[in-house]
Amino acid sequence: MAVDKSGLIKYLNSRGYDDISNSMDSYISSWKSWYQGKVDSFHSYTLLRGGHRITQTMASMQLAKFACEQWANFLFNEKCVILIDDGTESSPDEENEEEQQVGIMGRNRTAEYVRSVFDENDLYVKINEYQEKKCAYGTVAYIPYFDNGRIKLSYALADQMIPLSHSYGHITELCAYSSIVAGGEEYAFVQLFTLANTPLTEAVDGESSGSQYIIENILLKKPDRGGDYEEIDDISVIPGFEKVEAFVETGSTKIPFIVDKPNIVNNIDVDSPFGLAVFANSIDSMKMADTVFDSYTDEFILGRKRIIVSESMAEMISGRPVFDPSETVFMQIPLGTKDDNPLIQEIDMKIRADEHKQAIQSALDLFSYQNQFGENFFKFTDRGAVTATQVISENNGMFRAKKKHEIILESVLVDLIRLIIEVGIRNKMADGLNPGPTIKVKFDDSIIEDKEQEIRRRMSMVAGKLYDPVAYIAWYFNVSRDDAIKLMPPMSVSAAEEEGIR
């Protein structure tokens, strides 16, 4: 079940949107297939055997999925801290101090509101999930909306959006669509986010401009006889859409959706506002890896030990076969030897395991390099492809790539939080919300920390009485100073007190 995109474009053309490009569609479809693990045009092939063509499916190492998972974990995880300060910060209290170490930080009304939206929508999990999908599809859009007294978020991937206008690579007007079933009928649910010259009835952002963004919620249905999409005149009569507004005035000139994409220049269509999948320029190395991996798999299938026996050796004796017919190690041939003597011969093919492992590792190194992980990030072992245990330095290409991606992601997170606040103000979700708080994002940089080296350095400083042992315990166990004292042996605490460093 999928939306007929050509039919949707025809509908948009009838609405006056004529300049719609589909130059990226085939690439996005290809990236989706690689992310799913099997690409029909590559992983499905035929072999000629005995005059018959046999369809084969190539084994896949799932490298596209692997790479997207890794980048998602590096870019956004549970250790990412977002600090929100609306200028009314309250004093920290002992009860909540530990709770403020991760997630949305800030002791003010605006931070509390944003924290509640993140918690209700499980956004720390969802944003990590869509970082992975962003890396796979090249582009994702976050769309906050008000529903039945709550702020919720919907998401659109690259194959679920059509840019209606864009400027300098930024989508400014958007069509997001999906296929839904309501009341037993299939519909295309379409949302149009457009900037219109409609007077501001209630400006949220304090602007007095005559323009504002409007959101149209549309249901399209194909007639039973086929043909073009037809718009449902009143969506409130469709089950599940009784409370959905067909036309929403945002009262703001700010874009009501947030587009996120990897910080990679689109070298396929430089004029397109779509981003690239992180593996878009390494498809050939994925083909190389899967080709060798498939050959490695076949090596064990074709290299099974077999025993060839002549027909005379497989005769029945007293009504019973000489060899077990269910035993696959035996292969019967109709004749004996040239001397017409019975034949029994073992065939034990040599398996080229080491050669295949080296070839797979070479392919992984190339793929890793092209995806900015460094040459030795992936390692092929008996468990398959795994990430090598390593800590990267600030001079590593992967560190620089991570920081480069974070430039866009930080802007996305800040804009998303501001948009969540704006939707909350528009729908009177809470009093005292500041539409322009200071927002700071601290990403998880633990991958560039050499923990063992840092432990040794701090321990030597403690031994040299240059570093507070209580502070060291607090750092090592990530606890408060008081809790660190409780963890120390009494003699160590007394010694610290004697040195006057408590």
Image (cartoon, helix red, strand yellow):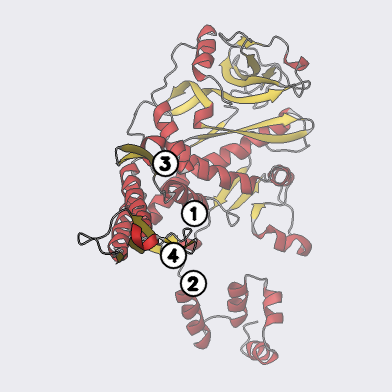
> In this figure, which residue is indicated by the disc labeled 4?
322
C-alpha separation, residue under disc 2 versus residue under disc 4: 66 Å
Q: Nearer the viewer, residue 241 or 117?
A: 241
Point out residue 162 in the picture as x, y percentages from the top left corner: 50, 23
Query: Mark 1 is on which residue type?
Result: Phe
Q: Earlier in the sequence, mark 2 or mark 4?
A: 4
C-alpha separation, residue under disc 3 versus residue under disc 4: 68 Å
Query: Mark 2 is on which residue type?
Result: Lys
> In this figure, which residue is indicated by the disc labeled 2?
451
Q: Image height check: is 135 above or below 189?
A: below
> Which quarter shows the N terminus?
top right
C-alpha separation, residue under disc 4 versus residue under disc 1: 62 Å
> In this figure, which residue is indicated by the disc labeled 3?
263
* Label 1: element kind: helix
Please say if the residues under marks 1 and 2 sit with CB atoms less than 8 Å apart: no
Q: Earlier in the sequence, mark 3 or mark 4?
A: 3
> In this figure, which residue is indicated by the disc labeled 1?
74
Residue located farthest toward the left when viewing the structure as drawn? 338
Q: Residue 248 vs residue 312: left or right?
A: right
C-alpha separation, residue under disc 1 versus residue under disc 3: 14 Å
Point out residue 153 in the picture as x, y percentages from the top left corner: 66, 35
**Mark 1, other Cα within 10 Å: few <14 / some 14–19 / many ≥20:** many
Which residue is rendered at x = 53% and y = 57% of the image? 444
In this rendering, the label closer to the viewer, 4 or 1: 4
- The count of marks equals 4
* Label 2: element kind: helix
Q: Is residue 434 visible?
A: yes
Please say if the residues under marks 2 and 4 sit with CB atoms less than 8 Å apart: no
